[in-house]
Image (spheres, rainbow, N blue to C red):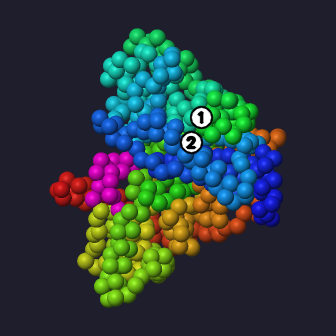
C-alpha cells in the first residue's frame, strides 16, 4: 500500500529514508526511498563530459559540484513535497558509470585528469592483458588504462598511491574508506568468483610486469578493498557530510554501503542477480547481462565478464547502436504526414508503426537494414553507416520494413548473445527488458524473446533506474538480515510487482535466426559502405 504524505513526512523526519545516488554520463541523479522501497523524492544535475587534449574527461570540480547540486535538488524536492528538512537517513550509497582511470599520489592529489570509460586509447594494453590473463580485458577497464600508461612510459605512474573508479572516489570523499563493491571492482580487474576478490593469479602476473618496469608498488598497495553487497562500506564522516551538503544540515554517522557501478545497480533495479536471469537495456545503445552458472569455456572478445553486487559471474554484451536509425525513420514518417497537413503525436506514431511490425513476415521478407551510426565492437567496426538493402523479390511493405528495423536494433546484440547462448550453451530462464525500445507494449518485447529464445518480462518498476537500484543495495545492507541479495530482492522488493511476460514464439525464433544469418553475411555490405561512402 502506498504511503501517505503524512507517513512519508514521518519517515523522513525520523531518519528512516534511504538515499541512492548515481553519476551517469549525462545526469547525476539522487533518489530517496522509504521502508517499502518506493521512491519518495528525487533530485538531479545535468552535466557533460569534455574532450581535452584527446581525452574524454570530467573535472573533479565538476564531479563535486554535480553531486552537491543533485543532493541540493533532492533536498528541495523533499522540502516542497513534505515540508520537512532532510537531516538524517537510515543508509545511503553511491554508484557511477564504471571503469576509467582515477589515480592519486600519497598526498591524495590527482595525478592526471580523469580518463573515462569512453576513451578508446588502450588497445595495445587491452590486447596484451587479454593474452596474458587468458581473460577478456576491454579497453575501458581500469587495469587496461593503468597498463597503457605504463606502456606509454608516463612519468606519473611511479607516483600512484591509490587507483579507484568514479564511484569509489565519491565514496572515499563521503567515508574516508578506500573500498569498492565487487561488481564495480570487476570493471577494474578480473574477479575470482570463488574468493569474491581480485583474481590472485592474475594480480601476481601483473605485479611481475610492474616490478620489471620498476614500479615501487603492487596492485595490493594501490587498489581499493573489495566488498560484497550487504557488507558495511563505512559511515558518513563529518567531512563527508559537509562535502555532500555544504549547508550543514546533514548529520554524519549514516551507514554507507559499498559503492557500485551502473551495471550492478541496473541488475538490482531489474531483479536480475541470480543465476540464469538477465536484463536487456535498449535505448540509444543496447546491452544485455546474463548471470552465469559457471565460467565460460573460451575467451570471447565480444563478451565482457563482470559480477553481480554479491559476486556472481555475469556475461555482458554491449552494443553502441540501437534506436538512433529507427528514430530517424519514424521522423521521416512524421515529416511525410505533416506534408499532408496532418498533425502527428509521436507516441501515437511510434505505437502504430511498432504494432504494424507484428504483421510482418517472421524473417522480414528479404529486407535488411543496418543501424550503425557508429562503430560496433561485437562485429569489429570502427565506424558505421546506416544502410537499407533488400532483394529484388523482397516483400517490401510497411510491416516488413518496420519489423526489419526493430530486428536491426537488436541484431548486433543477438550476434553476441548467440555466442553466449549457443556456442557456450549458457541457459537463461528469463530476461527483463527496460528502456525506450520497450515502450510500446508487446512489440519489441516479443521480438527480443525470439532473439534470446527465452521469456522477456517488462515490469512497472523497470523505469526506476540505477539510483533506485543503488538505494536498494543500501537498504539490503541495513535490512537484509540473513537473506541473500536475490532473496531480499525477490521477497522484500519485487514481491507482487506488476508486469508482463512474453514467451518466445517458435516461428519468430526461426524467422529471427534466418534474418541474422543474412545479417551476418551482409556485414560485408556494411564494410563496403564504411570504406567507400565518406
Front in this rendered view, residue 436 or 43: 43
Residue 266 in the magenta stretch? The answer is no
Mark 1 closeness class: few <14, some 14–19, many ≥20 residues within 10 Å: some
The residue drawn where x is 30% and y is 62% is 386
Mark 2 closeness class: few <14, some 14–19, many ≥20 residues within 10 Å: many
Please report whichever mark, 1 or 2, sits nearer to the chain's N-terminal start: 2
Q: Under tag 1, what secondary structure? A: helix
**Looking at the rendered structure, which numbered label has been put on residue 68?**
2
Q: How far apart are marks 1 and 2 (CA)?
A: 7 Å
The residue drawn where x is 49% and y is 66% is 437
Where 184 sits versus 4, above or below?
Answer: above
The residue that label 1 is drawn on is 243
Can residue 457 be seen in this snapshot? no
The residue drawn where x is 56% and y is 73% is 442
**Looking at the rendered structure, which numbered label has been put on residue 219?**
none
Front in this rendered view, residue 304 or 463: 463
Which quadrant of the view contains residue 373?
bottom left
Which stretch did the figure color magenta? Answer: 371-385
Quarter of the rendering occupied by the N terminus:
bottom right
The residue drawn where x is 54% and y is 69% is 439
**Dominant secondary structure (helix, strand or loop) of the stretch shown in magenta:** loop
Q: Where is residue 156 in the image (x, y as percent from the top left)?
A: 39, 19
Is label 1 in contact with label 2 (beta carbons under 8 Å)? Answer: yes
Amino acid at each position: 500500500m502506498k504511503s501517505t504524505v503524512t507517513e512519508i513526512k514521518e519517515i523522513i523526519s525520523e531518519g528512516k529514508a534511504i538515499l541512492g545516488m548515481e553519476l551517469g554520463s549525462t545526469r547525476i541523479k539522487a533518489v530517496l526511498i522509504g521502508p517499502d522501497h518506493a521512491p519518495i523524492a528525487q533530485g538531479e544535475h545535468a552535466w557533460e563530459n569534455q574532450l581535452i587534449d584527446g581525452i574524454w574527461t570530467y573535472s573533479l570540480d565538476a564531479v563535486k559540484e554535480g553531486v552537491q547540486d543533485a543532493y541540493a535538488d533532492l533536498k528541495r524536492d523533499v522540502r516542497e513535497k513534505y515540508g520537512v528538512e532532510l537531516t538524517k537517513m537510515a543508509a545511503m550509497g553511491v554508484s557511477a558509470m564504471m571503469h576509467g582511470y582515477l589515480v592519486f599520489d600519497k598526498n591524495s592529489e590527482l595525478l592526471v585528469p580523469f580518463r573515462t570509460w569512453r576513451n578508446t586509447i588502450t588497445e595495445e594494453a587491452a590486447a596484451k592483458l587479454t593474452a596474458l590473463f587468458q581473460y577478456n580485458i576491454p579497453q575501458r577497464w581500469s587495469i587496461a588504462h593503468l597498463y597503457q600508461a605504463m606502456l606509454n612510459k608516463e612519468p606519473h605512474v611511479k607516483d600512484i598511491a591509490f587507483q579507484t573508479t568514479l564511484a569509489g572516489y565519491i565514496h572515499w570523499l563521503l567515508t574516508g574508506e578506500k573500498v569498492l563493491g565487487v561488481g564495480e571492482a570487476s570493471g577494474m580487474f578480473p574477479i575470482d568468483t570463488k574468493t569474491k576478490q581480485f583474481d590472485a593469479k592474475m594480480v601476481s602476473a601483473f605485479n611481475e610486469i610492474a616490478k620489471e618496469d620498476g614500479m615501487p608498488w603492487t596492485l595490493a598497495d594501490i587498489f581499493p578493498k573489495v566488498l560484497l553487497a550487504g557488507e558495511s562500506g563505512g559511515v558518513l564522516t563529518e567531512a563527508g557530510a559537509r562535502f555532500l551538503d555544504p549547508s550543514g544540515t546533514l548529520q554524519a554517522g549514516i551507514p554507507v554501503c559499498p559503492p557500485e557501478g551502473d551495471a550492478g545497480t541496473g541488475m538490482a533495479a531489474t531483479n536480475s542477480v541470480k543465476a540464469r536471469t538477465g536484463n536487456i537495456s535498449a535505448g540509444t545503445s543496447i546491452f544485455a547481462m546474463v548471470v552465469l552458472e559457471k565460467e565460460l569455456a573460451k575467451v570471447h572478445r565480444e563478451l565482457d565478464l563482470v559480477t553481480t553486487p554479491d559476486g556472481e559471474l555475469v556475461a555482458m554484451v554491449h552494443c553502441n547502436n540501437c534506436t538512433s536509425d529507427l528514430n530517424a525513420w519514424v521522423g521521416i514518417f512524421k515529416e511525410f504526414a505533416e506534408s499532408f497537413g496532418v498533425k502527428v503525436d509521436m507516441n501515437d506514431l511510434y505505437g502504430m508503426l511498432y504494432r504494424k511490425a507484428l504483421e510482418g513476415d517472421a524473417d522480414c521478407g528479404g529486407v535488411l537494414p543496418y543501424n550503425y551510426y557508429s562503430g560496433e565492437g561485437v562485429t569489429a567496426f570502427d565506424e558505421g553507416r546506416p544502410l537499407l538493402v533488400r532483394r529484388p523479390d523482397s516483400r517490401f511493405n510497411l510491416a516488413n520494413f518496420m519489423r526489419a528495423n526493430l530486428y536491426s536494433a537488436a541484431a548486433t546484440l543477438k550476434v553476441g548473445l548467440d555466442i553466449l547462448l549457443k556456442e557456450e550453451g549458457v541457459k537463461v530462464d528469463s530476461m527483463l527488458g527496460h528502456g525506450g525500445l520497450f515502450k510500446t507494449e508487446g512489440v519489441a518485447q516479443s521480438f527480443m524473446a525470439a532473439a534470446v529464445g527465452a521469456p522477456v518480462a517488462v515490469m512497472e518498476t523497470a523505469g526506476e533506474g540505477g539510483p533506485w537500484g543503488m538505494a536498494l543495495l543500501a537498504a539490503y545492507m541495513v535490512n537484509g538480515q540473513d537473506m541473500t541479495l536475490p532473496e531480499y530482492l525477490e521477497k522484500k522488493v519485487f514481491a507482487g510487482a506488476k508486469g508482463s511476460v512474453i514467451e518466445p514464439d517458435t516461428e519468430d525464433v526461426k524467422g529471427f535466426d534466418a534474418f541474422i544469418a543474412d545479417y551476418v553475411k551482409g556485414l560485408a555490405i556494411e564494410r563496403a559502405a564504411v570504406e567507400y561512402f565518406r
